Image (tube, rainbow, N blue to C red):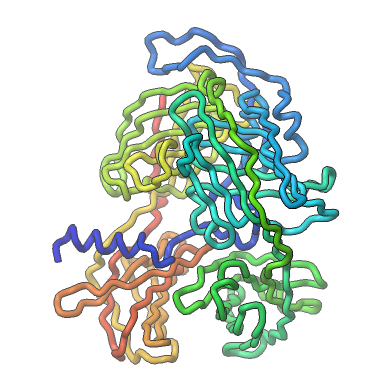
Amino acid sequence: MSKQAREEKVLAQQLGGDGSHTYPDFDAMWLRIEADREQEQAPIAVERTKRTGFLHGRRLAFLSSIAFVIIATPVLASMSGRWDFTSRPGLEAALHQGFGQTLNKSVTENGVTFTVDSAMSDDNGTTLLYSFDPKDKQARKWGFSEVELRGADGEKIAQVEGGRAMKMNWDKGYYSHTWDSENKQYNGFFETPWTFSSLKTDVQFIVRGLQEYRDKRVPLNLDLSRNGIHTFPIKKDGIDALNIEVVDQGAEGVLIKSSLRYMNKQAVDIASPRIQVMKDGKLMKSESLVRVWPDADGVYESRDDYRWKDINQKGITFELDYLVEGQKIDGEWNVGTLNLNKEKALNASATRELNIPFETSFGTSTIRKLIIRPTGIRIEVETPNAYDDPIYKNTFLSINGRKLKGYMGLGDGNKLKPYTKTKTFLFDVPPDLRITPDTPMELMLQNEYESKSDYAQPVMLKNISGEKQTVITDIEGYPVKWTYYKANGKLYVETDSMDEQFVGVDQTYYEQEGEQILSSIIYFNGSTPTNKLNVFSNFEGTELELYIKIYHVWHPDRNLTLKLQ
């Protein structure tokens, strides 16, 4: 097999449709889905001064003269206090400046009134602010079975299904809503990276089916002093049984590992299970949380880290919490044609052509553009290959000494395809930071993430059986623990490292008749990225020379500061 073919095969297995992908962990914040981003700035609006007709001959190209509004606009006034902008400061800033649209179009179906209140469109994406009133007296958990954005010609722009499907495809578009106790309704956002090239366009926004989800709680008589696996038969709501293993990690605390088996797909899609530790009836948060989607056998795994002194005390109880379906309201809510307009947003937008090269672990990348939009600042980077990402532990934009935390975007804003050569860093701007055409900016990239492949030294797995075995090896100076066992005709290989610089082993393989037999990958989701699970189907042996196909490392000494002006 050629090198190119092998790489394509690796890529196909990593990106294939078997459900073994990395996703944001939405379970702990059901129906309040946020983009997988870190935010450090408060949700406050941007104030800028009025500037017109400047910087001729410089690299800053304005589409039109800039007009900023520094008083609250009717759009923001109707939003303030009702929508939660905690993780959307850029959106709130844009609305505050007057770049949003008041739409206020409603439809009532089966006793539920659905309203598209406002919209915000620029080249960073499209957001619709909606509300709905199912006549609730107090908060309940509602989800739509389907949300769809269509063009005026009926062409589908973005479609978001409910339940697990929405969680797994959040990069195409997602929605979230929260209870408004004062107005007795739910206020939410639908967001998508899709935007339109013209100044105006017509769309239709359609939601279908309201499904209520209710919490179920099952007390667990978990004895922390007993070693081994604790089994709790559930046998209801589509859940078969729960296994819990308590692992004493010494100075590192205690790890609670759980494995839950489902009885049907419906439960897989909606349950969102979590092991809760309660102190005198109040939830105790774990030090870290890791979850993985159910595998092909319907098994869901999670792991939580706690300190012994926190959970080994009086008043501590354990429970399994999950969701079940409650009331269902059938129907389709379509408010009709929505006229989106981003002319004002583009009038306050700027694009600076840069073309600044910088070296990464996979070659030379180039900063192509600095783009200022009402909802935030974008920096477009072109990489040598579509599947290369310039990932750093910390990404900041320094403006007049202020450091704005950044996150990776999804491409050039006009496509819903994240795998392109164009990558973006996105930044929200706080209100007390004024930006002018002469404002110096620096992009600060800290602790580069490097992917490596085809590690030469194999790992020998001996005495493979249904019992878990462990072996510790050294990979480039990093200790890596391998835990392996057989179950259901499959070989499971779990890797972990206590060294934070070692991100983890991603994929492994063994050789058979000159071919590489690649593992399928289950990515644990949460704050411990070093933990992966590789699976080999139809494995019958008792010993194996296992090779590392792909692994990842953080480099604390690889830092860049790039002047953008």
User: Who's the residue at 73% across and 25% down the image?
Assistant: 74
Which quadrant, please, contains the C terminus? top left
Q: Position of residue 42 (x, y in %)?
A: 67, 38
Q: Nearer the viewer, residue 321 or 525?
A: 321
Q: Position of residue 444 (x, y in %)?
A: 45, 37
Left or right: 421, with 290 as reference point: left
User: Who's the residue at 41% across and 40% down the image?
Assistant: 415
User: Who's the residue at 56% across and 77% down the image?
Assistant: 264
Q: Is residue 182 above or below residue 235?
A: above
Which quadrant, please, contains the N terminus? bottom left
Left or right: 359, with 515 as reference point: right
Q: Is residue 236 above or below residue 558?
A: below
Q: Nearer the viewer, residue 305 or 221?
A: 221
Quadrant housing residue 187: top right
Q: Position of residue 354 (x, y in %)?
A: 35, 26
Quadrant housing residue 461: bottom left
Q: Nearer the viewer, residue 103 or 514?
A: 103
Residue 396 visible, this orientation? no
Residue 268 visible, this orientation? yes
User: Who's the residue at 76% across and 58% down the image?
Assistant: 140
